[in-house]
Amino acid sequence: MSFFSGFKRLTCLTLLLTVLFAGGFTFTSLPVFANTANPEEAVKSEGTTTEAVKEGEKKVEYPPAPKLTVADYPQIGSFNPRILVWIVAQLHLWFAAFVLAVPIFVLIIEALGMATKDQRYDNMAYEFIKVSMAAYSITAIIGGLLTFSLLVFYPDLFKYMASLFSRSMLAYAFLFFAESASLYIYYYGWHWLEGGFKKWVHLTIGLVLNFVGTVLMLLANAWVSFSMSPNGVDPATGAFLGSEWNVIHNFLWNPLNLHRVIANIAYGGSIIGAYAAYKFLGSSSKEDKAHYDWMGYTANVIAVGGLLPLPFAGYWLTKEIYAYSQQMGITLMGGVFAWLFIMQAVLIGALFLSVNYYLWCGMERSEGSVRYTKNIKWIAAAVVACFLVWFTPHTLVLTNQELKALGGPYHKYLGPLGIMPAKNTAVNIMIILTFLSFTLYRRANKIATVSWAAAGSAVQAAIFAGAIANIIFLGVFYGYFTNTAYKVAASIPQVSTTAVVIIFTLIIDSMMFKGAKDVAPLKWGNVPGRSQYALFTLAVSFTWLMGLMGYIRSGIRQHWHVNSIMRDNSINAFTPTIGYAAQVVTLAAVIFMAIVIFIFWLSNISAKKSAAH
Amino acid sequence: MKIFLKIVFFCILAFSGFVGFANFGIPQVKPAPPPTEEKLDLGNMTMDQFIALGDKIFNGKGTCTLCHNNVGKRAPMLDGAGEEAVANNALLRLKDPRYKGKATTPEEYIRESMKTPSAFVVAGFGSDNDTKSPMPVITQGSIGLSDAEVDAVIAFLLNKAGVEVTVKIPVGAPPSEKAEEAKPAEPAKTPEEVIAKFGCGACHKIGKEEGALGPDLTRVGKSKNEPYLRRAILDPNADIAKNCPGGPCAPGMMPPDFGAKMTGSEFEMLVQYLVKSK
Amino acid sequence: MKLPKLLQAVLVVVAVYIAFKLVFSVGLQQPIPSSLLTMYMFFVVVATLLVTTATEESAKEMSGPIKALVEDPSKKTIRNIVFVLVPLLAGWMTYSNLRPSFEAPVELRTIHPAPPGSMKAFGKSYDLAKLENPFRKYQKEDPEKFKALVKEGGAVYYKNCHYCHGDKLDGQGQYAQGFNPLPLNFQDIGTIAQLQESFLFWRIATGGPGLPKEATPWLSAMPVWKDFLTEDEIWKVILFLYDYTGQAPRSWAAH
């Protein structure tokens, strides 16, 4: 036994070294991309002849992007390779988002457990990472399948991309090993590295794991964003210009990075929430119910934490797409894809409603909630009002009679709700209201003991009211009475207002409820089954929404593999209708959910087995 | 199990709600199919495709950008914007007292300058007081564009300048792709043929050619030995001579691909010819 | 007397529906399109259900009468009536949805379709992604000259455009009612203020025939102005459109 544990330690140490090595590799390799001289700069800096000779030697001519014909795409019978690649890529993305996000908040929860010395946090963090372990290998398998299907069905595209990203693909492979290594140590070393200094080591490994995971994602994002906004290649021919860093650091890379990191966290939270809901509904003992209720609640808080800033990150990404190419921007928001955003609005509305519903139902846990339940209907009414504004389309579907009645394709009063300032206003208020639900939920079981409690609450109410008034004012004034340059700018003070509300409310709350007394002990597990379905709705809507938005992001290139550089000449280069896309997304989502349920089931068996021992 | 089925049912219900709304709740816009791509069939080409062909020749087969780039300043820019577009300068040049040709329109001017480069030399780019152009006749020699290809390049240059494209698309005269491919099959038989075939005289003073961009090669055998000359052809940037007519030579000017284009016997003949040029 | 929860919920939904109808169709004379109203009402119903089931107590109150209707032996007569009425209602709705009518099918028209990457006019090709209004710079550099240019643009507008787009640029020109689609109302916040100047240049120069397929099925009657106006005139009239409506073109240069 001692030999075994010694051996295990040795393996762990080796793996740790690998991780550090690989981490160092990324650090050193990134500047290498940057140092590789851009030929234009090289020519400009040509000073003396000798230097120039060296540059001349270095300068390599890269082949242009291939021009393909239908015959260049392998075709097996009537099999549709695009749908295969589409579904596999989407599955890979879902799983990857999940396994990259979970370690982020596992690390936070673990640190929280360490700080509060509450063993429950540690146990929950361990259970989270356990769920993501099985998903991790599936991510890798599907990633392999994706590479394989690209190689088989889109060989020239793959070759071209590989020629541009040769070094980062190599780095990716290395980092993948580093990711695996650190994940395995993190998970299997959980109980071994417990207590005192060892826990610090464990946390550090968790940090390395997250760092490597994030870099992995950034690299993969570069491939995707390059295909939308190519950079570092000759715009006429697509020939590589010599600097891989320029190719990676393309116009849409950073907006995409931010959007994906935030969305991953929200998504990971929602899937864990669904897992907890599943376990909650399935467990019969009171302790289990309480545990999984708490777990679902925590996961939901994480998901909401990610969900709240997400619209802004998305707004930035869209704005940058617009700035990159007017054609792409209008295709996205005003052209063929505009109606997908109505679909998106419906899904986001579903997310917000289910989050709120979960919080309202959660008030059952506390006996003090009766004080607040009567407010629910007003919050609901306001959320719905915002939501209706949020999804009112710019272009209306009209029958001929309606067209005549309106006197044109624009609605005088609903039309102005169709453009961005109205949407921004609505979504900011929706976020503030959701946060209000959360605040009410948090204080449902508390009675403030500080002397200024009434005044504090009044100040908070004033902050909420003032903020909502300010957001509406900003939206209406800047959105409708100034010109477009300000319209875009108006969203920033709106977002700041929302942020101010959240921060100040949290600060006042934390002071006001310091040493507050509980109405009664919180009854974890005492929630109706309905609320758990809200968690499922959250996970399901999120999954489907990600699939849809993934399609939009990829689809706005239309018939290009790499926008305006490498054309897609296969028979499947057409842009599908919304219904077609929705069907493919649904098919992929059903497959994903089936695999996820399988993973839940797997972790269930292992739990049963360890309980039996 | 009951719960499991309930959940599955719920998920499927949610998905069908979404897919149902996407299919029936919102109008189905059928996006236009991808635009058909240009076919390089001169017979039924549109003007856009013809211009695109000219672009391709300008940057590829025609080797125009070898000199007409903004790197080496060896020749004036042709395809830039505004002042740098040849078609915008053409009318001015036609009025220039130094102009010796017969052209009256930008189109004719560009065609003339490709066939008789010395008809007008932009100030600062020629030899003998800007009367002799270093540019090869591009319908002959190693570049050897067909008339249709010349027209395509003109169309490209006119379009680039933003002036009206007056060129007519030639009918039934496909570019001489086949002839082009057949050429390398007949190796040159004498050193003079090699020099003509690879257009050495476009830049160098060699034999009867009077190129004035690269070093004078009429007596090169005197100062350079055989290994140096071999290297100079195979890897032009290995050594950069200092005796170009306009001062020290700029690197990267000589095409580096002669080694790949010449046959063994052509290469040998040329090297021996140069060694003997004393 | 306190109303039963279920009845309350139904009343709320009906009240919202009537309010929509009253406010928009009667009060503002701008009815909500039925496709949109359906979606609005769907979410109102969902939200009402969510609110009424948020607490255990009210959820029981909600489901109580329904349970009783199905299970309570004393409610046999009502049960039978409901069980006959509900399928009939569903059948009638299906029938009225499928019944053929003379109404033209609802079709969607994209009012501002995505522009092509480049366009041809006046014997040149324009890269629409980079195209700028050559006169826009005078707004800052030389306001006097800019004013003069706007004025010239106004002259072009009133000579050519106002017949359809109206003398107040509101799309209510004297011939406007003869067209389908109607001429665009430039005063609307959702029109030119959302677009870049190169987009307007494209739309004006190529007119109705220049619209891509997604902007059909209604054919715009807008003439191909590049055949009638010069390039400068189009740019000037664009200046005028923004100046008169007090809008600024969408631009990324400000950042």
Image: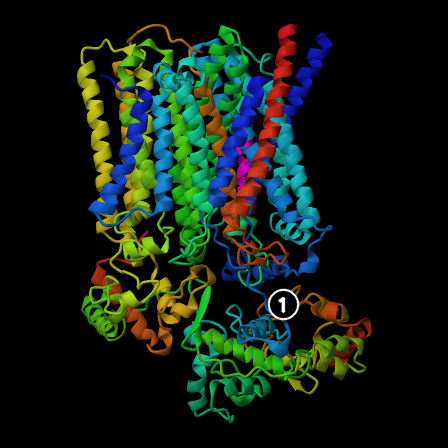
Residue B269 percent coordinates (x, y): 80, 77
Asked if A40 appears above or below A436 in the picture, the reply is below
Indicate the chain on which mark 1 is placed: B
| Residue nearest the viewer, comparing A232 with A537 | A537
* Residue at the (77%, 77%) spot, across then down: B182
Image quarter hosting the C terminus of chain A:
top right
Q: Is residue A269 left or right of residue A607?
A: left
**Residue beneath label 1, please?**
B240
User: Can residue B130 be seen in this snapshot?
Assistant: no
- Please tell me in which quadrant of the rendered image residue A427 appears: top left
Q: Is residue A47 left or right of residue A451?
A: right
Image quarter hosting the N terminus of chain A:
top right
Magenta part, dominant SS? helix
Q: Is residue A97 magenta?
A: no
Segment tinted magenta in the rendering:
A208-223
Q: Which residue lies furthest to the front in this view?
A: C77
Asked if A579 appears above or below A608 in the picture, the reply is below
Residue A237 percent coordinates (x, y): 58, 62
| Residue nearest the viewer, comparing A511 with A75 | A75
Q: How is the image coloured?
A: rainbow
Residue B27 percent coordinates (x, y): 45, 49
Q: What residue type is labelled 1?
A: Ile
Asked if B75 appears above or below A318 in the picture, the reply is below
User: Can residue A45 be seen in this snapshot?
Assistant: yes
Q: In this view, does A67 lie to the left or right of C81?
A: right
Q: Is residue A211 magenta?
A: yes
> Tag 1's secondary structure?
loop
